[in-house]
Amino acid sequence: MATAALAATATATAKAAHAAPQADTGPTTGPKTGPRTGPRTGPKIGILLYDGYGLLDPTGPAEVLSRLPDATVTMIAERRGPVRTDTADVAVVADRSIDEVDRLDVLLVPGAGNRGTIAAMNNEALLRWIRRIHRHSRWTASVCTGSIILAAAGLLDGRRATTYWASAEYLQSTYDVTYLPERYVRSGKIITAAGVSAGVDMSLYLASLITDEDTARAIQLAVEYDPQPPFDSGNATQAGPQLKQRALELLAASQV
Amino acid sequence: MATAALAATATATAKAAHAAPQADTGPTTGPKTGPRTGPRTGPKIGILLYDGYGLLDPTGPAEVLSRLPDATVTMIAERRGPVRTDTADVAVVADRSIDEVDRLDVLLVPGAGNRGTIAAMNNEALLRWIRRIHRHSRWTASVCTGSIILAAAGLLDGRRATTYWASAEYLQSTYDVTYLPERYVRSGKIITAAGVSAGVDMSLYLASLITDEDTARAIQLAVEYDPQPPFDSGNATQAGPQLKQRALELLAASQV
């Protein structure tokens, strides 16, 4: 059986190699190695969804990490099914419940508005699951206030971490955590990212740790991440009080 | 009844104003104007999902545009229900079918891998709906190969536009479109963005057009968009052939 499987793999590889030069038939040019078939043997990445998360927190990292060779990205929640964002406008489907997932190579916990973050911090079933998965994970990561949920699970005791800029004081005053105003912070196998969009930067760094820098650089090009924001107002340490107030007003007003 | 409603609104406003100074009770500090209640009178933003889209293409813009004052962001597809990404790992829920949506202030069409892009280009029901919504939209936007779908719908004839770097030649050689290697390109009320992550930059620009620069700058801070990618490999015009080849291999291998 092992020989037959190997032979089948060799045939598939030969076919792929043969197909490659003539496969420029779609709107996006380039080598065609897909479609992907068979079981995936690469990193198993699980992203925890819970009511009220911010949409970009899980989806930015999912986009980046899904391009790792042979990776699986799974959205996980307390129960299977659609999980709504902080605005309640959008739902991503959790394809697995926490009861169905025992091991992950990478666990990622996104952030949320106050409603979602507080509920998750007080959800013992979620915190237990986070601790359990973290025990055997290769990497445990967070985006935005996801680090506060990691802290509530007891994973950040005595560590350095980052979080959403407007949550830094809370994180530092509530837990035994040293807040760093960085885009992402690695402490052992835990990597925390700053707010919302910082998950994309963090995931590229994480991709380089999981594979190598060449692969991570190629993923950055695959998602054309050459950021050119039209404004320069994304850094809270350089923002005045009025801009901060306005940002938090817009956030609060958009959330349910 | 109108008087009663107004009185109720006044009471709610007074309560909110009273509550503001003492509302710093959650992990994220700042003014508490939410939770949002009542009908939303701001811009109606619709994002078209179709089988095989790239996850960040719709979700990055949804995150940014959902912070516009009183905005509604709706995920729309040919039929209601979960719509899977190019890797088939993740599904976002379409809460409305195209038959249920007649008017939008903003229509956004995300991109996809070859399978999804080709299917959408050849889906006359989708193209008809895109043309119909575009007729009355304030803004029509695309991310990545979404511009090829706009072109297939006939919306880009004689226009300048951008698209995913590896799809530029296809766009330009197949349609009457002048490709520009920009992060986003505005042509009248149509704004096209480059690949995947470019939708975030484009959406901040679009936010400034819908409201004003101050609001867009505050949204950028709200999503902490202060990009600091660990590498500098996201721009295809500066990438060598090996890096491009590797990026396209990773993409193709991750897609189903």
Image: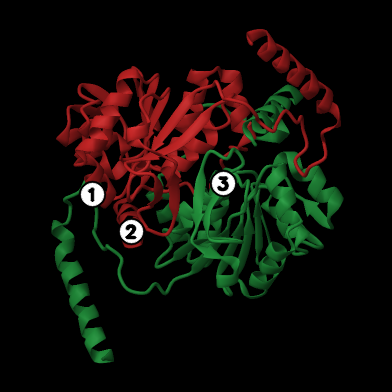
Chain colours: A red, B green
- Disc 1 marks a residue whose amino acid type is Thr
Residue in front for this viewpoint, B152 or A124: A124
Report whether B204 appears left or right of A2. Answer: left
Report whether A148 appears left or right of B162. Answer: left
Q: Is residue A161 above or below residue A168?
A: above
Q: Chain of mark 1?
A: B
Q: Are marks 3 and 2 in contact (CB under 8 Å)?
A: no
Report whether A178 appears left or right of A44. Answer: left
Q: Chain of mark 3?
A: B
- Disc 2 marks a residue whose amino acid type is Gln
**Where is residue B126, by image quadrant?**
bottom right
Distance from the alpha carbon under mark 3 to that under mark 2 = 26 Å
Q: Which residue was labeled with disc 1? A: B29
Q: Chain of mark 2?
A: A
Question: What is the secondary structure assignment of the residue under circle 1?
Answer: loop
Assign the C terminus of chain B to one quadrant of the image. Answer: top right
The crowding category of the residue bearing disc 2, from other C-alpha atoms within 10 Å (few below 14, some 14 to 19, many at least 20), is many
Q: Is residue A188 above or below residue B160?
A: above
Distance from the alpha carbon under mark 1 to that under mark 3 = 36 Å
**Where is residue B114, by image quadrant?**
top right
Q: Which residue was labeled with disc 3? A: B84
User: Residue at left 24%, top 79%?
Assistant: B9
Q: Which residue was labeled with disc 2? A: A255
Q: Is residue B104 visible?
A: no
Distance from the alpha carbon under mark 2 to that under mark 1 = 14 Å
Give the mark toward the camera: 3 or 2. Answer: 3
Give the mark toward the camera: 1 or 3. Answer: 3
Residue in front for this viewpoint, A107 or A251: A107
Residue B149 at x, y percent in the picture:
72, 56
- Looking at this view, name the residue that lies furthest to the top: A3
Residue A147's disc is: none
